[in-house]
Image (cartoon, rainbow, N blue to C red):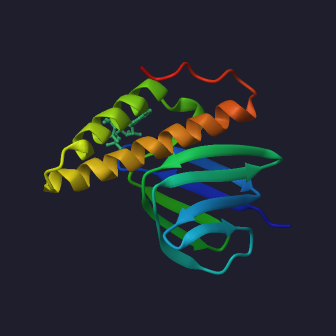
Amino acid sequence: MPKLNVDIVTAEKLVYSEEGVDELIVPGIEGELGVLPLHAPLLTMIQPGVLRIVKGGEEVQMAITGGFIEVRQNRITILADAAERGDEIDVTRAEEARRRAQERLATKEVTADMLRAEAALKRALVRLKAAERVRRRRGGAPPPPAS
Ligand code: ATP
């Protein structure tokens, strides 16, 4: 059975580059998209969500804040706005970002800033979800409640 080559890049860096990947589960704009070897060619958008990479029985959880995925002959390229592995996420920073965004959204004024706050809230929630999934898989203790 052929395997997948996966590259995940942002404007800043190469976040992930592996051969021998078995499956990728991507938050596509039309819902979760599973990509197995021999998948048909594809170019589509990604929405903020948790990306899962399955390789040799191990699963990597990654927060991705949007971008594009291209599938071509078992080679997958993801151009991401931002992407972090679940175990590299700074949970305190994401909680702060969530709190700031929620504060901005709590004001009744409708401004362009609200759209930015909504996007920032989505990014923060996706990061917290990816970090939480990694923590649960490892059977770690829950984080202390946010103050
Ligand atoms: P913040 O307000 O905390 O900066 P943000 O959503 O505005 O969050 P982005 O603009 O999406 O941040 O990302 C900027 C850079 O910081 C990217 O390289 C991204 O991977 C990284 N990053 C953002 N939040 C976190 C986090 N909680 N943990 C680890 N890296 C993060």
Relative to residue 110, is residue 14 drawn left or right? right
Q: Residue 22 placed where, x, y %? A: 77, 58
As drawn, which residue projects farthest toward the right?
A: 1
Residue 114 appears anywhere in the view:
yes
Position of 19 with respect to 105 (left or right) is right
Seen from the viewer's position, the closer of residues 115 and 71 is 115
Instruction: State the residue at coordinates (73%, 68%).
Output: 36
Query: Outermost residue, front direction?
Result: 108
Relative to the observer, which residue lies in front, 45 or 138? 138
**Where residue 48 sits: x, y (%)?**
46, 55
What residue is shown at x 60% (from left), y 35% (from top)?
132
Q: With 23 as the anchor, is 127 left or right in this view?
A: left
The answer to whether residue 14 of the structure is visible from this angle is no
Q: Residue at x 23, y 41 (%)?
A: 104
Quadrant containing the C terminus is top left
Label total for image = 0
Q: Residue at x 49, y 40 (%)?
A: 127
Is the residue 29 above or below the residue 18 in the image?
A: below
> Residue 79 placed where, x, y %?
44, 59
Q: Quadrant of ligand 1?
A: top left
User: Where 132 falls versus 140 (above or below)?
Assistant: below
Whole-percent x and y of residue 38? 74, 75
* Quadrant location, the N terminus: bottom right
- Above or below: residue 26 compared with residue 106: below
